Image (spheres, rainbow, N blue to C red):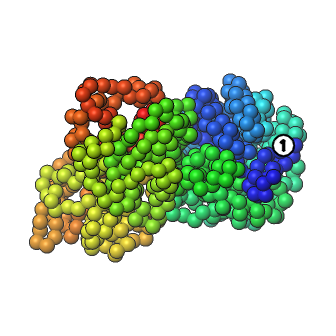
Amino acid sequence: MSTDPLLQPYRLKHLTLKNRIMTTSHEPAYPEDGMPKARYRAYHAERAKAGVALTMTAGSAAVSRDSPPVFNNILAYKDEVVPWMAELTDACHEHGCAVMIQLTHLGRRTHWNKGDWLPAVSAGHEREPAHRAFPKMVETWDIARIVRDYADAAERMQAAGLDGIELQAYGHLMDQFWSERTNALDGGYGGTLDNRLRFTFEVLDAIRERVGADFLVGLRYTADEMAEGGISVAEGLEISRKLTDCGQVDFLNVIRGHIETDPGLTDVIPVQGMKNAPHLDFAGTIRRETGMPTFHAAKIPDVATARHAVAEGLLDMVGMTRAHMADPHIVRKITEGREHDIRPCVGATYCLDRIYQAGDALCIHNAATGRELSMPHVVPAADTRRRIAIAGAGPAGLEAARVAAERGHEVVVFEAAADPGGQIRLTAQNPRRREMMSIIDWRMSQCAARDVEFRFNTWAEAEDIAALAPDAVIVATGGLPHTEVLREGNDLVVSAWDIIAGDVAPGQNVLVYDDAGDHAGLQAAEVIANAGGHVEVMTPDRSFAPDVPAMNLTPYMRSLQKRDTTFTVTYRLTAVRRDGNRLKAIIDSDYGPLGQERTFDQIVVNHGTLPMDELYFDLKPDATNLGEVDHDALLAGRPQAVVTNPDGAYQLFRIGDAVSARNTHAAIYDALRLVKDL
């Protein structure tokens, strides 16, 4: 029997969990019509069959109609949810994985123009900054109705065969009652702590009356809001003791912080460059003070940290939620002695940022996550071994090489630079984004284990590729900055890449003209600001950096706002002229001509990339498919069989930014869905 702390069973009341690893509640936004259908089920079943002990479904399944989902949440207030949750539960139970669900009423963390257009409700009238609805202050009949809704939802989950439920009390209605920041009620539900907790205990009483004493019920709650006037550590400990003493709660899942603003949310769920496991010791304090079964998750990305959490008695169950989005097979790899094979979570938080932009959760470098119905986490071997030539060792090229090698093909990769990584290596120049290099390092180690041949410092020409006599060629050469965007003076500007890479020294009074809206513009601005320069970030859009979503934007703003930086929206740079030893910027607006003139000593343009596609077009005449991709076959998961040039020597494809400027996930997805069928 293993002595690994993570692999020890844990008994929670009557339920034995087979190890100490769980995925905490999170909403990947996969429901269809509010129901957890096939895609949702496949996502959780993948983790279950790989050995996770407990999968906590549905971040914030809605218990009431006036808690309309803002992240495509499960609608727990509908009876039709029962058979869908039963199918999901059965699929996970088949692999010995326990299943729970998080139930909540969002309170003010929603908006009245969602769902049935009912007013948002809360314990006060204060608007939540993130969702901007001014809530109605709850009346006693609202409270009685919502208590019944909680009990109804819990009963549905018990009927579906789940092992238990978790109530959410951080940023939602329940802790909007708890916190004096948000509770403006008089009488029995406001004022003293006992009054502010009354709603919670009424919910627990109603749930227990419906589901009995054996069904597992826990809370995921903030025990310290880390906000002026909010729940303090002392008050959080008192709440924890009251939850323990009531005898109706089976486990505590500890959160620290508040989530109604982007910076607050980012401190609760830290992104790359922030400290790992920042609230772990605090969760350990709650466990020590209460003696309750304690769960916790907050940037616990690696097995070593998780093992420490259990071995030192800080947690009973450790949540590795984003880590399982990067690699759902963590537990299997631990048990098989293959920790080195675990695909690392790099903290990019592409998953959550997509949800908060009304998208679905996708991992920045595991394109199979959320696509379990069509994309493999383990690539099957090919029937016939082929020779594959790949140009480019950025994320697209390395994913293509990894997948081709896993299929058993012979793979040769050409790379013009001395090292792999492409744009990710450039991105990782920022100390806060160094974790991104793990995307490259993991693929390099996977390729090394499968004897992929790399030829670095080699600018591949068509004849070099042809000399290999390949069966297929994949061009993943990426792109180069596009700075030809002005009607005049394109030769006077530099690119964001020039600044990030250190090829051009930062100026002292700099305009960063960013109409791409991605990380490169803000990274360049940060380099300049850190060097002591004044930076103005200008965009023609109505908001700056729209492709750097909320949680990733937070570290940039915390850095740039401390320095000499300004942001200007809705202005377009149209031309640049010399003005002595300085540069004159001609500035207009899409809303009408302005013709403003301002001077800077340096102008930086961030306008995405243009494909480096010369090699592709040189190779195209000798390709059997002339570069054509059968989109129907690609999307259906069938091999590419286009033959428009029977005399050609190889199949030819291009992927990633060699096609068009997109992002890391798109490049990796391009590679996976093409090469898995080659």
Residue occupying the point 27% across, 44% down: 467
Relative to 291, does residue 400 appear above or below in the rendering? above
Side of 258 where 143 appears, left or right: right
Residue occupying the point 88% across, 49% down: 247
Local packing at callout 1 (Cα closer than 10 Å; few below 14, some 14-19, many 20+) is some
Relative to 235, does residue 336 appear above or below in the rendering? above
Side of 474 where 379 appears, left or right: right
Figure quadrant of the C terminus: top left
Could you say where residue 230 lies in the image, as x and y percent from the top left? 66, 61
Residue occupying the point 81% across, 50% down: 9
Quadrant for residue 192, please give it.
Answer: bottom right
Side of 418 where 17 appears, left or right: right
> Disc 1 marks which amino acid?
Leu
- Residue bearing mark 1: 15
Question: Under tag 1, what secondary structure?
Answer: strand
Could you say where residue 38 lies in the image, as x and y percent from the top left? 60, 28
Residue occupying the point 31% across, 44% down: 468
Quadrant for residue 69, please give it.
Answer: top right
Could you say where residue 497 lies in the image, as x and y percent from the top left? 30, 60
Q: Is 289 in front, or is 450?
A: 450
Q: Quick one: which residue is furthest to the bottom in this view?
A: 532
